[in-house]
Amino acid sequence: MTRRAAIIGGGVIGGGWAARFALMGWDVRVFDPDPDAKRKLDEVLSNARRALPGLYDAPLPPEGSLTLVDTMTEAVDGAAWIQESVPERLDLKRKVFQALQSSAPDDAIIGSSTSGFKPSELQGCATIPDRIVVAHPFNPVYLLPVVELVTTDRNAPDLVTRAQAILTSIGMVPLHLPREIDAHVADRLLEAVWREALWLVNDGIATTEQIDEVIRLGFGLRWAQMGLFETYRIAGGEAGMAHFLGQFGPALKWPWTKLMDVPDLTDALIQQISDQSDAQSGHHSIRDLERIRDGNLVAILRGLKQTGQGAGTHLSETDKALTDFKLDPTQPVETANRQIPLDWTDYNGHMTEARYLDAFANATDRFMELIGCDAAYIASGGSFFTAETHIRHLAEVNAGDRIRITTQVLGGAGKKMHLFHTMWLGDTVAATGEHMLLHVSLETRRTAEPLEPVRTRLTEMAEGHAGLPMPDGAGRAIQSS
Amino acid sequence: MTRRAAIIGGGVIGGGWAARFALMGWDVRVFDPDPDAKRKLDEVLSNARRALPGLYDAPLPPEGSLTLVDTMTEAVDGAAWIQESVPERLDLKRKVFQALQSSAPDDAIIGSSTSGFKPSELQGCATIPDRIVVAHPFNPVYLLPVVELVTTDRNAPDLVTRAQAILTSIGMVPLHLPREIDAHVADRLLEAVWREALWLVNDGIATTEQIDEVIRLGFGLRWAQMGLFETYRIAGGEAGMAHFLGQFGPALKWPWTKLMDVPDLTDALIQQISDQSDAQSGHHSIRDLERIRDGNLVAILRGLKQTGQGAGTHLSETDKALTDFKLDPTQPVETANRQIPLDWTDYNGHMTEARYLDAFANATDRFMELIGCDAAYIASGGSFFTAETHIRHLAEVNAGDRIRITTQVLGGAGKKMHLFHTMWLGDTVAATGEHMLLHVSLETRRTAEPLEPVRTRLTEMAEGHAGLPMPDGAGRAIQSS
């Protein structure tokens, strides 16, 4: 399969798709007749470059090309995935499918970003309906993993499998919905909340800011990691889900369901919401808000990656799929090759002191895996604990910088493992980390000889590195001032 | 004001209140006739101890007492805050207010955790209606900051101010809603989502797990940090909020609003949801799920604390209110006194290697503030950058352990600042951190002499510490193995 994607419509959503494909190594062609399309696309790409690659602890493939082209035919030429993100009008979307169906490659999958239309409606007038699916993403497309993949009986199982594989390969989590429905799943929920929120503002119960606060300081925090049902499962406590439902049931008939009709979006209500939103967020430009949002999302996503839950588990799976280090036992080992994530930097944009040790500790973990001290070995009761660390901070490293770490074994005999990491920023040494580790029994928490295969592999590496020159700064102490 | 709270009803919500008050230094008395109340309360408190204190980088006050008492009268005796969290039945809640009103202290505020009833309904039959307010929290009460404070005209402004101050002092963010409405704000939104979710399961469109996934891998991540309106403000892009609303408006009339009636919670539907929830989460006990949730929430909250957004800003404000270190210039300075947060630990429950440097870097920041290198000084263009770090890891530190860091100045002249941190776990030295910092101009990014008052204060500290013995391990290099 050629890793080439066509993006039809380069707005906020189309641009997000383009950025995600390109950063995951696909060549992307975008068709958008908007004269301002180039600028908008560049802005989305620049935001995405800042935020996405650092989500991963593994090196991403080299960035693909991103080209704005003049015709839809040119865009879809040779594409394995075609994504339509034009405005939410059925006639317009159908026109797009009709225009591109003759030039789309035979095996191309055509995804629509529609939040509202059913795939059968989109397939309606097409000559190749079997290749059109709904692939509904969430803004920002380059950070939020989920995509609703809605299909009909006309889509062959093989095509659905292929669509899932492609979406997974670009770091997304396709949620397959084989039964179509207006607005799929997410926008049904969003629509319901939106309706209630409009009432609350309309009736002067709460401002837009108060509504946002009650969400982001309250249930939004729950939903970011467990969603709705698992949260309520907990609320039910020991009595269980059925008991909880029985209790909650009567509330559905409570008086506030009287407000289920739709408020009129009068000019006055629009003005009221717009004014409140200005008062709440008007001191930030939209670009500012996007960067604030992306910084938060990266922090949340990387937090969940560490707990191994929710969206974080999927990041780790992508890491695994991306990792492919090669080992030459006579040379320093490459133990990291990564972009500095946003949450490793302080308000100055440069990497905070403590994250140097994060980077080195990850490199140590990687080295341990390479000598067989992996999850299975650790589960069997042995591991290395760090006893001593010496870091020299030699150059500033900024958010988005790509660093490499190479690791030299200074000693590896008995219970001791003495490692020297060098952090490279291009050809510059940004920092060095010297670490003395001791092998321990996780049961007794005391030092113990390593078991096989760790003992043999560490010895091999130590012998392989014995001929290398002692790196600059090794064995050094902080000089008294 | 005595820091004494009475909790009426010790279930999931009441227990959460009790734990939050106690961990923030209040003495708490709980009344709950449930024979199992003690065990349940202890379990909530143990979860809360594990998660809450580590949210803060400042030392919390000593934990207050938590006592289960036999009568409501005993519970409310001397209490400044009385919180009612009995089951959601108006007659029951009114009975509680009537029972406690004669023994409640004159200035006690009586909060109700009700998610549905209006404060006027609760005030209805009471002899002291002016002191009853709705204080509706979110589960887990010991972690989620927001509380809906709903009042009526009967509550004097002074009482409302006092209520806000008390809630803020225990780390909460009171959202004051002076216009009462059924179900306040949050549960109106939750109710709407719940209704739609029931339809989706009922109609076989999505399972409970799929609904949770689309939330926690999609819009839940947005809502955890910006809420609804600010998210949509961004979605509107450069054209602004009014333009976005104009576009979104028609969607409110789309066909899916036909589903605004309420699905019947038949036994079959309850069983279906319960079965799906078992399939999704049944391999975890409720206690497991709570701990997973709390770990995620701590990671998210601390991530947002770092970005300085949403719920994170409020944590930092509480830190500031809690911080009160004393300085004796002839002795090592206490620069940290904190509990190890959940997100600093690995799957073994012990502090990960890199977080030792986090702790030391925070201690350095604190020391810098003490010598006048605070936010204002840094904004004026000067700061210290770390050039070299030497850490000795001497004892394991676990999640929830309370550590102290004391800091000795080994040198402070010219551009150099040489610090030695000792991390104490009780009387045991858990780690030491030796750090050489250089004063830099943030404009040129080169070393530069510190300005006043930093120069003088650092000199004073260095002179004050000159008579102290050199700490064990200072000036040490990693020994070649």
Image (tube, coloured by chain):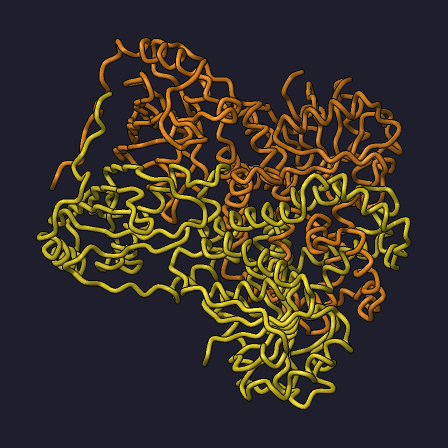
Chain colours: A orange, B yellow
Q: Can residue A24 be seen at all in this image of the molecule?
A: yes
* Residue A178 appears left or right of A52: right
Which residue sits at x=74%, y=41%?
B209
Q: Residue A92's spot in the image, x, y percent?
A: 79, 40
Q: Is residue A330 above or below residue A59?
A: above
Choose between B177 and A29: the one closer to the eye: B177
Say which quarter of the image contains residue B282.
Answer: top right
Say which quarter of the image contains residue A477.
Answer: top left
Which residue sits at x=46%, y=79%?
B2
User: Residue pushed farthest bottom?
Assistant: B127
Q: How many labels does the image show?
A: 0
Q: Residue B395's spot in the image, x, y percent?
A: 33, 39
Q: Residue B320's spot in the image, x, y percent?
A: 38, 64
Q: In this view, does B195 lie above or below B21?
A: above
Which residue sits at x=53%, y=79%?
B79
Choose between B23 and B344: the one closer to the eye: B23
Q: Residue A61's spot in the image, x, y percent?
A: 52, 22
Q: In which quarter of the image is the C terminus of chain B?
A: top left
* Residue B102 appears left or right of A114: left
Choose between A290 and A104: the one closer to the eye: A290
* Residue A414 appears left or right of B163: left
Q: Can residue A201 be seen at all in this image of the molecule?
A: no
Q: In which quarter of the image is the N terminus of chain B?
A: bottom left
Which residue sits at x=72%, y=51%?
A233
